[in-house]
């Protein structure tokens, strides 16, 4: 087993849990769909979180030739995966099985309240990005800091201005697609 394989086993487990959490939440929403107040922006947010989960997994393969692993590199990647998991955990509302009140299943209200934690968790993910881009990939510092800083600014806006969630998630979707293009 190579060092890359060893490192990415832990990261893959966390990312697998993140995918499971996000898909499980979506399945739960389908099961109780008659009580769900659907909104496109929250669904789009969850899709973007899924894209970033898959993007981290994909980028991980690009590190297969990296040979100078340190414990700091390992911790940075694990921390990034943990932040992605947190974003997945909080991306969609969850049924609390209170028969008389289903207000927790309002997608947009969730995104403007507890779902803000999902954005703050993504903020943590973007904070790890410069280390990965500069130390592991050897990319130039300016774009390696500037591109994640843009994502971080969007996360701060989403968390800090919940009334702007709908337009901000549209901008974030464009940002996510740009990141996929750059890392594909």
Image (cartoon, helix red, strand yellow):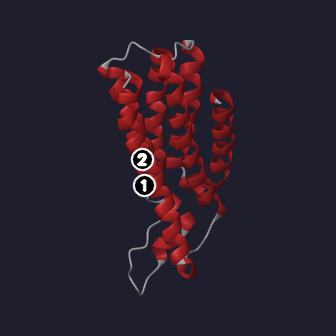
Q: Is residue 143 above or below residue 52?
A: above
Viewer-proximal residue among 14 and 101: 14
**Tag 1 residue:** 89
Point out residue 125 in the picture as x, y percentages from the top left corner.
45, 36
170 with respect to 6 (left or right): right
In the picture, the quarter occupied by the N terminus is top left
Secondary structure of the residue carrying tag 1 is helix
Separation of disc 2 and disc 1 at Cα? 6 Å
Instruction: Say whether residue 33 is visible.
Output: yes
In the picture, the quarter occupied by the C terminus is top right
Query: Image quadrant of residue 83?
Result: top left
Q: In this view, does 102 lie above or below 183?
A: below
Point out residue 127 in the picture as x, y percentages from the top left corner.
45, 30
Point out residue 173 in the picture as x, y percentages from the top left corner.
66, 45
User: How busy is the neighbourhood of tag 2: few (under 14 within 10 Å), some, or many (20 plus)?
Assistant: many
User: How busy is the neighbourhood of tag 1: few (under 14 within 10 Å), some, or many (20 plus)?
Assistant: many
Please tell me the numbered disc located at residue 85.
2
Point out residue 52 in the picture as x, y percentages from the top left corner.
55, 41
Q: Residue at x 52, y 71 (%)?
A: 29
Q: Residue at x 68, y 39 (%)?
A: 177
Secondary structure of the residue carrying tag 2 is helix
Whether the residues at callouts 2 and 1 have beta carbons within 8 Å, the answer is yes
Instruction: Say whether residue 79 is visible.
Output: no
17 with respect to 173 (left or right): left
Q: Which residue is drawn at 39% across and 12% down?
A: 68
Please tell me the numbered disc located at residue 154.
none
């Amino acid at each position: 087993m190579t060092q890359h394989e060893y490192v990415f086993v832990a990261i893959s487990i966390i990312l697998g849990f993140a995918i499971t959490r996000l898909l499980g939440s979506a399945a739960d929403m389908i099961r109780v769909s008659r009580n769900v107040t659907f909104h496109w922006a929250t669904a789009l947010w969850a899709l973007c979180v899924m894209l970033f989960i898959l993007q981290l997994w994909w980028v991980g393969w690009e590190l297969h030739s990296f040979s100078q692993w340190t414990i700091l590199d390992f911790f940075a990647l694990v921390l990034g995966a943990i932040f992605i998991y947190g974003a997945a955990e909080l991306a969609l509302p969850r049924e609390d099985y209170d028969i008389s009140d289903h207000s927790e299943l309002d997608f947009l209200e969730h995104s403007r309240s507890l779902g803000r934690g999902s954005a703050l968790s993504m903020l943590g993910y973007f904070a790890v990005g410069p280390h990965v881009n500069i130390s592991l990939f050897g990319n130039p510092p300016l774009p390696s800091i500037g591109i994640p800083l843009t994502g971080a600014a969007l996360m701060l806006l989403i968390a800090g201005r919940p009334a702007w969630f709908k337009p901000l998630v549209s901008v974030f979707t464009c940002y996510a697609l740009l990141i996929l293009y750059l890392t594909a």
